Amino acid sequence: MSDLNFVLAVTLITWTGLFLYVLRVDLKVKEAKRREEV
Amino acid sequence: MFWQTVLGIWMAAVIGASFLLVPPTQGLGELGRIVIYHVPAAWVAVLAYLMAMANSVAYLRKGDLRLDRQAQVNAELGTVFCLLATVTGAIWSKAAWGWYWNWDPRQTSIFVLLMIYGAYFVLRSAIPDTDRRARLSAVYAILAFLTVPFLVFIVPRVYATLHPDLVLIAREGRQLDMDVPMLLVFLASVAGFTGLYFWLYKVQTGLENLLHKQALKRGEEL
């Protein structure tokens, strides 16, 4: 693997990881708001 | 929504600039670009752990459970960013040293740090009583943060390490030894990660407060 591939891997892992974390928080917020409305 | 959009555009620009503007680093070549994500992630981890300690001190002084929830959110965010710093560092390690993990003092100290904050969450989940959990975890968070300067700044400098911060942040006189385009993209990334931390902190604390309110309505302890 060339050095740029490692840089690309770091970029993808960082943003995929952060995206999944934000998605998890967002789902929890939506679930809490749904329960609040019920 | 406005600030989230600005943050999204800002970080997209940082990603683009890290490939288009940042030149290969002396001694590290293309791998030097990894610093654009790795160091800001580590910085936010330290910031979040510091905030967790500040919240814990404030909780012990005031006894307000909102501060306990803020400390928990900060510890969680710190651990997420610490994990990112560990994984990005391991990829760099594979590229530069040939192994993802070789127990270099930097890797060992960040591993110990993750274990220490992992134990914080185990402690929280093991105590059902809200006040007792808040009090004990506040004391633990303060003690845990005392290890952060030691593990992040002292251990890697006392023991011989291959970690390349001396190459990237070595000072010549009063100036950082970093190319101007790289320094600008690096600082933009630090600002973006810090903004991301504050946004996530705001959303997470709002969520924890809402969950607490709902639990109180149901007559449960949370």
Image: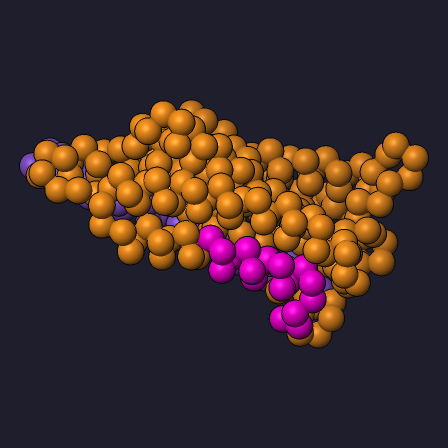
Q: How is the image coloured?
A: by chain
Q: Is residue B25 above or below residue B65?
A: below
Chain letter, purple: A
Question: Residue B51 placed where, x, y %?
Answer: 49, 35
Quarter of the rendering occupied by the C terminus of chain A? top left
Say whether residue B165 is visible. Answer: yes
Side of B161 where B80 appears, left or right: left
Side of B83 where B36 appears, left or right: right
Question: Residue B168 placed where, x, y %?
Answer: 79, 48
Q: Is residue B75 above or below residue B96?
A: above
Side of B161 where B43 appears, left or right: left
Query: Front-most of B52 and A14?
Result: B52
Q: Look at the image and give the residue range highlighted in magenta.
A: B100-117
Chain letter, orange: B
Quarter of the rendering occupied by the N terminus of chain A? bottom right
Query: Front-most of A35 and B147?
Result: B147
Q: Is residue B114 magenta?
A: yes
Question: Residue B72 placed where, x, y %?
Answer: 38, 42
Q: Is residue B126 above or below residue B136?
A: below
Query: Front-most of B77 and B91?
Result: B77
